[in-house]
Image (cartoon, rainbow, N blue to C red):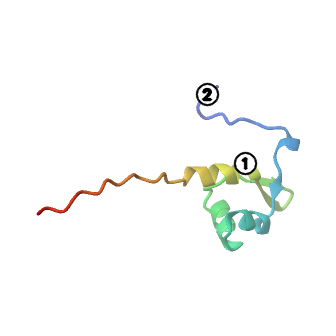
Amino acid sequence: MKTDERKVTSPGDDRLLTYSEAAEVLNTTERFPRRLVEERRICFVRVGRFIRIPESALREFISAGLVEPVAVRRRGRAA
């Protein structure tokens, strides 16, 4: 598979969410998913004149922004 090809899933595998449903998943306002689509930062589907966001695209967006914690070693005070 080429690097620019994306895996295509069957329609039954992935729910298509409205802006308000996507905002609920992200725990944000409805404006945020609209901006993600407008800026082409997330995949979306056009269904007629409606925009729907695949649930998998939201999962990918969330996992791409995941920041792992860093273990901090405390140093003793100098005497």
Rendering coords of residue 2 (x, y %): 61, 27
Q: Residue at x 84, y 62 (%)?
A: 49
Q: Residue at x 88, y 43 (%)?
A: 12
Question: Are the residues flagged by discs 1 and 2 in contact, CB closer than 8 Å?
Answer: no
Q: Amino acid at mark 1?
A: Ser
Closer to the camera in the image, 58 or 3: 58
Q: Is residue 15 above or below residue 4?
A: below
Which mark is nearer the camera, 1 or 2? Answer: 1
Q: Residue at x 82, y 54 (%)?
A: 16
Q: Which numbered marker is on residue 13?
A: none
Q: Residue at x 18, y 62 (%)?
A: 77
Q: Amino acid at mark 2?
A: Lys
Rendering coords of residue 44 (x, y %): 73, 53
Rendering coords of residue 10 (x, y %): 84, 38
Q: Is residue 49 left or right of residue 43?
A: right
* Residue of label 1: 56
Q: Quadrant of residue 51?
A: bottom right
Q: Is residue 55 left or right of residue 77?
A: right
Q: Is residue 15 above or below residue 39?
A: above
* Residue of label 2: 2
Query: Which one is earlier in the sequence, the residue at label 1 or at label 2?
Result: 2
Rendering coords of residue 18 (x, y %): 80, 63
Label 1 neighbour load within 10 Å: few <14, some 14-19, many 20+: some
Label 2 secondary element: loop
Residue at the top extreme of this rendering = 1
